[in-house]
Image (cartoon, rainbow, N blue to C red):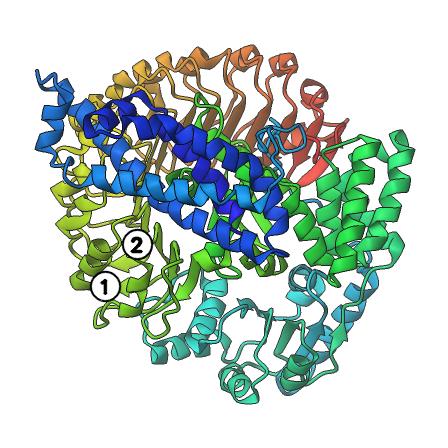
Amino acid sequence: MATVTIFPLVKIALKTSANPAVQEVGAALGVKTELQQLPNTLLPIEATLQDAESRQFSNTSVKKWLEELKDVLYDLDDLLDELATAALELKEKKKGSLLKKVSNSFSSLALHSELAPKLKKIFGKLNEVAARRVDLQFNANPADPADTSRNRLGEREVVTLVRPSNCIGRENDEEEMIKRVLTCGDHDTLSVIPIVGAGGMGKTMFAKILSYNEKISSKFQVILWGCLSGKSDLRMIIEDIIKSRTGASSLNLTMEELRSVLHQLLQNNKYFLVLDDVWTEDPREWKRLRDLLDVGAKGSTVMVTTRSNVVASVVGTEKAYVLRRLSDEDCWSVFANYAFNEGDDEKYPSLVEIGRSTVKKCGGVPLAAEIVGSLLSRDRDEQEWQRVKALLEKLREQLDDAVVAAVKLSYEEMPPQLKACFSYFLMFPNDYTVYRDELINTWMAQGLLDLGDQNANLADVGARYFGEMLSRSLFRSAFLIVGAGTGNCKIHDMVSDFIPYIAGDEFATNVNCASVLASEKVRHIGFHDFNLSRKAFPQGLLKAKKARSFMLLGQVGPITKSFLENLISKFSCLRILNLLGSEFDELPSSIGTLKHLRYLSLFSNFSIKRLPDSICKLINLQTLDLRHCEQLKELPREIGKLISLKQLYLTSQLKVLPEKGFKGLISLQVMKLVDCQMLVSLSEGIGYLTALQELHIVRCPRLASLPSSMGTLPALKVLEIVDCKEMDLMEADGIRGLRGLTILSIGNLPKLVKLPGAFQAATSSLQHLMISNCASLTTLPRWLQYFGHLKKLYLYDCANLQAFPKECSHLTNLQYLDIRGCTHLSRRCAKDEGDDWPHISHVPIISLDGNWIQKNKSPWEQ
């Protein structure tokens, strides 16, 4: 579906060409007129996209035109980005130069002879394609499709909880399966129980519920999990099983060593293993895996989830259990759990009537009911519900699968900018854990968040997009840290099956050196292989030389310099280079030639010691991820030249952060210092980071204090300090100036005996406060009562915290209180009985040691 890509490309081109600095450079290159006329070409195209999208499947001429338009717009975007980069470089040169004439500056950049002719050629090609639009007789929609009331994204708070509807209608199934598993637990040989059900029936969640059931977990010594979705390689399957138990990567182990580790986990242990989403119907492949598993103690049991009866017959030693469709009433309960807040069904009887009729089109499939219910939860207008019902009925006439129809409905109801972000999930294989912040940063790197309000904070836009997808029930599982806004998710496999329909030819995922499926249409490459120390760069990938993303998926291990040099030299259009989980000593200096690069990750490179100075030429770089680069000894001296850098994540052996090096990082918004074992000082240079909004300091054991210049950070909103055993916040004068702080998280600080009074600077701004694992903390300060904007308070594992100050009854805006592992406090806060209950009874939602003791509002509403 080409339009999902065309919309953002049109928006980006319009925005870039309107930039005065770009127009100034364009004038010097002789393309000023073409830049000024670009809106005359693109705006009519944008107005026809809605009609073109609906006609592309029934009209091959429309489909062909859209594909040609997409290719031209990609090339145009690359050239306009070069122009914008040149403008940015010129701006930086002017800061240190008396040079006034633009043309003279550009002679030094040698752009006259290269960029101008390319721009003129692509403008001509665009005009040719645009002219053919008239022949196709599109209906124009003058309104911006992203700005209609139906498509406009709301400002709702990100949903942070997943509703407990997974067991609705499955009570009898659960009881029966527990009996079967416990019976198998008494067998002498390995038992394999298949669970069969159509996609969207909830097999994965059902298996998880069973594996956590106390009757089952108490019967077995070891509980393990492996997801086989899309995995045919035995090594990957073994790694997955091992990781579910140990939590550690097995990257550097040989196949024989992996077998040995698995053998040690299983041998003489009575284990319960779930193999989720099994597809292989080859008895020989199953036998290879089963032989490895058949070493446990008597009663060991494997549960297999699958959509296929053939798979069940191949793997099962027990009769397959079929997870059937829900009854209409149970399906309604699932739908209502997502569509309504508590009491809404009584307020809106007409919507209940429409909803019950709509649910019948979900065919008893719980995932379909969740998605449709989530879609309707945002509206209480009767006509809107009728409209969505009619759309679903039409889709069900075309599609047999209720889940595919529900996903297609949810997708078609997305605004265009959200569709573009949603399509990027095609980058990831099934069961891949996608981290929220990294996903948002990749959207940002592709320009997908910069399509609307020019003054909007892009990270906030990305968070809103992520929250919108989460609220649509498109993720199979999601974990979010409430307040801090971090976490991860996995997308439903049925949703993954739908995404190729959107932009399938642009993504090549799970590519490796042995099997390269790439074409010149490919713009995003997901690469997954093991130990590239003796493997050459796959020549078949070179067809995709215009790719914008290259991501390593999973732990790759050693990688050669020649592999990297080939990658960098052949893929000059990259916006994203994610070398996660790879190991090499040296990043080639040619990295500085990737002028379009916005996102560079060397996450978990345990070998690299230095970065090349040429990395400072990446003037467009927005995200630099150096977490778990444990051997990194220093940062480049001129790192301050990265004027577009917004996120810096760092693990290193630095003792002191650069004093002057940060001076040029005028755009830096987020800095995360993780596992910096030698760090003793942030240096006063941190005061130069005037745009900094988030500072995270995690596991920096030698860092004892914060610099006074922190008080000059006017934009700082989030401060996290965790696992810093020498940190003494009482000596941190810098926090006195943090008047705009909205989120404060402190944890595992052994020297913290009381909250520093300096935090009172944030009295009128702080909204979320989390304190965890502070064993020396005995009291909360009475001045906490003055934090009138505090909404959420989390107190975890502070065993010596004695009481809740009575003055906290003045925290009238406090909406959510969560206390766990605080023995004395839990006793004193017991509902109606504890001494401190009167001080907190006004809080609408209170959780005590994992149990809701008060819910005056629906937690989903909260």
Q: Nearer the viewer, residue 836 or 596?
A: 596
Label placed on residue 283: none
* Residue 450 in view of the camera: no
Q: Residue at x 79, y 58 (%)?
A: 397
> Is 75 left, or right, of 839 in this rendering?
left
Pinpoint residue 840: horizontal percent, then vertical percent: 68, 21
Tell which circle, 1 or 2, labels the residue nearer the N-terminal end: 1
From this view, report whether residue 194 is shown above or below residue 821. Answer: below
Q: Residue at x 59, y 47 (%)?
A: 53
From this view, report whether residue 2 is shown above or below residue 382. Answer: below
Pinpoint residue 241: horizontal percent, then vertical percent: 49, 69
| Residue at the disc numbered 1 | 559
- The amino acid pointed to by label 1 is Ile
Callout 1–callout 2 Cβ contact below 8 Å: yes
* Residue 497 in view of the camera: yes
Pinpoint residue 620: horizontal percent, then vertical percent: 27, 35
Q: CA distance from mark 1 to mark 2?
A: 10 Å
Q: Secondary structure at mark 2?
A: loop
Q: Residues within 10 Å of mark 2 (few under 14, many from 20)?
A: many
| Residue at the disc numbered 2 | 579
Q: Residues within 10 Å of mark 1 (few under 14, many from 20)?
A: many
Pinpoint residue 296: horizontal percent, then vertical percent: 54, 81
Q: Nearer the viewer, residue 110 or 445?
A: 110
Q: Residue at x 49, y 80 (%)?
A: 267
Q: Residue at x 75, y 59 (%)?
A: 398
> Is 750 left, or right, of 102 in this rendering?
right
Report the number of numbered marks: 2
From this view, report whether residue 634 is shown above or below residue 527. Answer: above
